[in-house]
Amino acid sequence: MRDFAQAADERRQHFFYILIHEPLGPVERGKKYEDPLTEALGELGKVTGSGSMLREDKTVAFFGIDVVVNDRDRGLKVIRQCLQTCGAADDTVIEEYIPEFNALPLRGDAPPGDANPATGRDYVDSEVVSITSTPAESAPWIGSLVQHEGFPMALRVRPKADSPANRKAFTRSLVVTHELANVKPNGLPEDEYNHSLAAFDRAVHRFIEGEQRGLVVIVETYAGKRIYYCYVDATATFKDRYAKLKAEYPVHKLTIGHCEEPTWETYELYRKLFPW
């Protein structure tokens, strides 16, 4: 995809790749999305290609649409408006590769697949937004939808949080797993339910990052679960905070685990599996 983006950039255009999780074949996706996009863009741009990803049973898992536009910001606005009018789901992602990779959400600057528009998703998200009052105010989030074992994974990561100072300060891995109550057949949360989790998502970040005793570095939404991978101060205790979090949100099924991880092995594994 980056080759397409670079070629468009040389023509003074901008390339977008639209990722939509619907089981539509070429004819159906053309009628529902490609033709309306072509009409909506007009002289601003055009659809240049499309393709599907198939599961092992040969059904369509998701499909992508290639678009080039003459003006990045105007083109993105038209694409978002058109896709929403056509009924695209909120987990739709609009990827761009120049000047750097971003996975842009369908609606505004909310991260894809993530409940929290204020923090940057799950997903997803990507948007570049720093969480305030944390030890990584200069560390933005990026997010995207990736495929893992044939199913979508909304992944949100914080690349610039990986610094010598943070590795020295936060040597213990802490993992918070939220078992999602309402999920789609593909394992991602239902849209309305996902939106309802915004306050809880912020609470999880406060639970970890309060008093600058920890840092959330990866948020993964996959197979009916949202998992927060964190690194924390080994001398800090989170027992009281965890009890408060569960008391404030008793309807959510949570589990927590931790171990010593001074070399950030989990972070390194994810970076190897899903390069950022």
Image: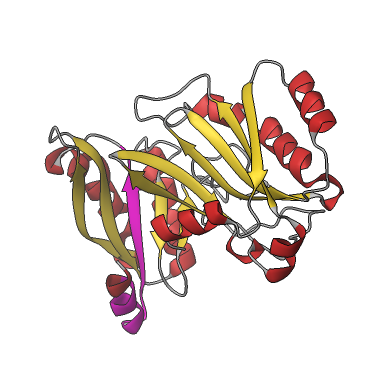
Point out residue 56 in the picture as x, y percentages from the top left corner.
Answer: 16, 36
One can see residue 142 in this view: no
The residue depicted at 70 percent of the width and 57 percent of the height is 130
Vertical comparison of 83 with 247: above or below:
below
Image side of residue 93 versus residue 254, left or right = left
Q: Where is residue 26 in the image (x, y as percent from the top left)?
A: 14, 44
272, 109: nearer the viewer: 272
Q: Is 5 or 258 nearer to us in this picture?
A: 258
Q: In which quarter of the image is residue 187?
A: top left
Query: Which quarter of the rendered picture does the N terminus lie within?
Result: bottom left
Numbered disc total: 0
Residue 110 is a magenta residue: no
Q: Determine which quarter of the picture holds residue 201.
A: top right
In the picture provided, is 150 more to the left or to the right than 93?
Answer: left
In the orientation shown, which residue stands out farthest toward the bottom? 10
User: Closer to the camera, 221 or 76?
Assistant: 221
Residue bounds of the magenta highlight: 5-21
The residue under the point 15% across, 39% down is: 25
Q: What is the x, y in percent for residue 180? A: 53, 24
Question: Which residue is at a point 27% across and 59% down the rendered structure image?
Answer: 66
Residue nearer the viewer, 74 or 162:
162
Farthest top residue? 251
Q: Is residue 96 above or below residue 180?
A: below
